[in-house]
Amino acid sequence: MSQDSNQDKDKLWGGRFNEPTDAFVEKFTASVNFDQRMAMQDIAGSRIHARMLTKVGVLTQQDCEDILRGLDEVEQDIVNGEFIWSVALEDVHMNIESALTAKIGDAGKRLHTGRSRNDQVATDIRLYLREQIAFIVAEIRRLQNGLIDLAEREFETIMPGFTHLQVAQPITFGHHMMAWFEMLHRDASRMTDCASRMNQLPLGAAALAGTSYPIDRQFSAEQLGFDQPTRNSLDSVSDRDFAIEFCAASALIMTHLSRFSEELVLWSSAQFDFIDLPDRFCTGSSIMPQKKNPDVPELVRGKVGRVNGHLICLLTLMKSQPLAYNKDNQEDKEPLFDTIDTVAGSLRAFADMMPAISCKKENMYNAAKQGFSTATDLADYLVRKGLPFRDAHEVVGKAVAFGVDTKKDLSEMTLAELQQFSDMISDDVFDVLTLEGSVAARNHIGGTAPQQVKKAVATARLLISE
Ligand code: ARG
């Protein structure tokens, strides 16, 4: 519920003002329509602030009890959808404080002792973002698990590996899935890094300089699950680097998902026809009855734009701001919240989709046979027989040209045909020209051999169980 009105009597800062706020300015400067998302964190911070003030003797035990009871009631009203949000009260902080005072009287007015909305909002965002990061990391883990399961199922499924989107060398589908696992693994670690760097409590910085009350910031930090209080009050209220960092890490997640999306779109096309995306992740066309469109990956690919935009938005917001708090910072929330929603939603869609992807193994196998994907294997074979690599490259190049003319893959040529290019070739060559031989030969850490995929799967399971 929300209420739109110019009620100057409600203003918590009205003392020095002689005329009501302009009606448009009131709406223009308000943030309550979007920052009410942090209501639970705002209440959590207020509970601890009240307990801390009581502990150091600034509030009485009675005030504290009233405040805690009042905050419980406000919380219930919000949860039940009965709270009336007022634009005249500007933001989530003043809406909650005002509702508290309406419920408990003067004790409510004492809650804001020794604090400012500047350190309050800096605390709320951190509390909120911390929870959201935990959720995002959990979604990354779910997606990683899906990839591991796919890799395990398809550890020896052969597909063409590409460079320049041209067939390059045969690889295993499992190996390809584990490449996505690795990218997401770094993404998750960037997120947890960001969460640990920002896990310092700004509350106590007050407006900018600290407060004259004998506050116990260590207590508040511990109670709110922060590693420690921030070390500098000016920095505490003014920087939003943690939000920028989060958006940067998010932009990378989205970038990775966009590449993943692109492949799913290509692979599910009639031209590639490598995989089947289940119907429930696709939509049809209103005009073309035959269409089954890979909407989910397409949409995720498209959503990168807004996240990249939010990153630039926050960087630009922070640029050149003089210390300490400036109202500019109120503009941090919408980009941040939309980034959270976009990343969490995209990860969720992908994690849900993974178990349902099915491979069209025969199509992948046939595609890997095209494009002379074992040419490097033939060159390596000649090197093992004593030819310098550059000469081997030349020999195989000629064999490929012959194959292009005669429409034959290297593995389809006779021994005599192959021997025209080098007399070092003997009948053991066919072992390396098969797709199976080619992938099995890349049997080292990080290689595409099925045995390595199995090992990578085992390592990955350990990595994400830590
Ligand atoms: N709504 C404000 C924000 O999001 C809260 C802090 C306002 N502080 C102030 N001095 N006006 O940044």
Image (cartoon, grey):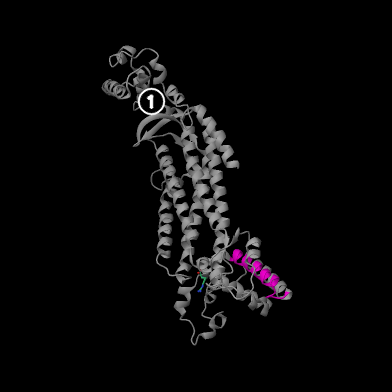
**Residue depicted at x 47% and y 38%:** 179
Instruction: Left or right? Give the position of 172 relative to 115.
Output: left
Q: Which residues are magenta?
A: 39-60
Q: Looking at the picture, does residue 279 appear above or below residue 384?
A: below
The residue singled out by tag 1 in the image is: 369
Question: How many marks are shown on the rendered structure?
Answer: 1
Nearer the observer, 97 or 466: 466
Q: Looking at the picture, does residue 297 appear above or below residue 247?
A: above
Q: Looking at the picture, does residue 435 appear above or below residue 30?
A: above
Q: Is residue 58 magenta?
A: yes
Residue 432 rendering spot, x and y as whole percentages: 40, 20
Element type at mark 1: helix
The rendered magenta stretch, by its main secondary structure, is classed as helix
Q: Which amino acid lies under the numbered mark 1 shown in the image of this protein?
A: Lys
**Residue depicted at x 46% and y 66%:** 331
Q: Quadrant of the C terminus?
A: top right
Q: Is residue 146 magenta?
A: no
Instruction: Left or right? Give the position of 359 relative to 398.
Output: right
Residue 154 rendering spot, x and y as whole percentages: 51, 31
Instruction: Left or right? Give the position of 237 relative to 288.
Output: right
